[in-house]
Image: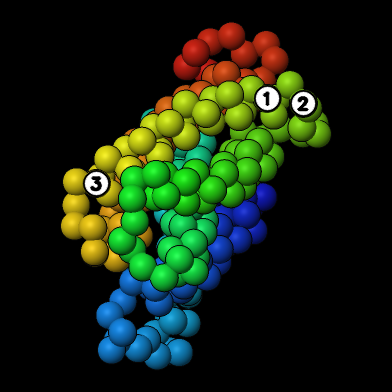
Amino acid sequence: MERKDLMPILAVGAGVGLLIQPILANNLPAHVHLSAAFRVGIFLLFVLIAPFALWVASRIARFVKGIYQFAQFAAVGTLNTFIDIGVFNLETFLYGTPVMGAGLFAAFKAVSFLFATTNSFVWNKYWTFGAKQRASAREAAGFYSVAIFGWALNVGVATIVKMAGPADSRTWVNIVAPVGGVAASFLWDFLGYKYLVFRKRGDARFGADR
């Protein structure tokens, strides 16, 4: 693992470790109370796992070209996922019940996706794909153009999964369905951002990598 990537990957791990706290609180049965020690342990677990996973990817990258950058994208994607699900859980917590129609669910999901996508733009531009220049209006437009299709996949699949499951299940509505949407858009986002938005000048090969 490159030394310059240590602090970013630690920040990713810490972000996930913090965001998982309200998600757990919003979906566990009312009689289940997590101790402070358990919450701290979960936080530290993610802080340690994140750099370890990137280190493993750096070892594999000696034999598989492109895997290190994909691991960076996956790390950012994990943070985005927890932002997406965390914001969505905040919305459903304020709404008061997991029982809702497809329209309201899609609206909540669209808002959480916007938060996650904005985070994705910053992290992927400056860390995953190593851009040095400030973001331009054209680049941002390209990013959100790719993201629109990703949004359609994300929200569409999440809504379908939600409607296919038990309407009164917090776990299904707040976690399973949103994760299904994230998984559907993940590969599209990586390919679109890498080869359409953040491609470096002079890099004309589709398979080129850092």
Identity of the residue drawn at 69% across and 29% down: 140
Foreground mark, 3 or 1? 3
Q: Amino acid at mark 3?
A: Met
Residue annotated with mark 1? 141
Question: How many numbered callouts?
Answer: 3
Viewer can see residue 164? yes
Does dot 3 land on a helix, a strand or a loop? helix
Identity of the residue drawn at 59% across and 9% down: 204
Residue 181 x %, y % = 36, 42
* Disc nearer the start of the sequence (3/1): 1
Residue 165 x %, y % = 19, 52
Label number found at residue 156 = none
Q: Amino acid at mark 1?
A: Ala
Label 1: few (<14), some or many (≥20) within 10 Å? Answer: few
Disc 1 to disc 2: CB gap under 8 Å = yes
Q: Is residue 175 above or below residue 68?
A: below
* Nearer to the camera, 39 or 210: 39
Residue annotated with mark 3? 163
Label number found at residue 137 = 2
Classify residue 31 as left or right of residue 72: left
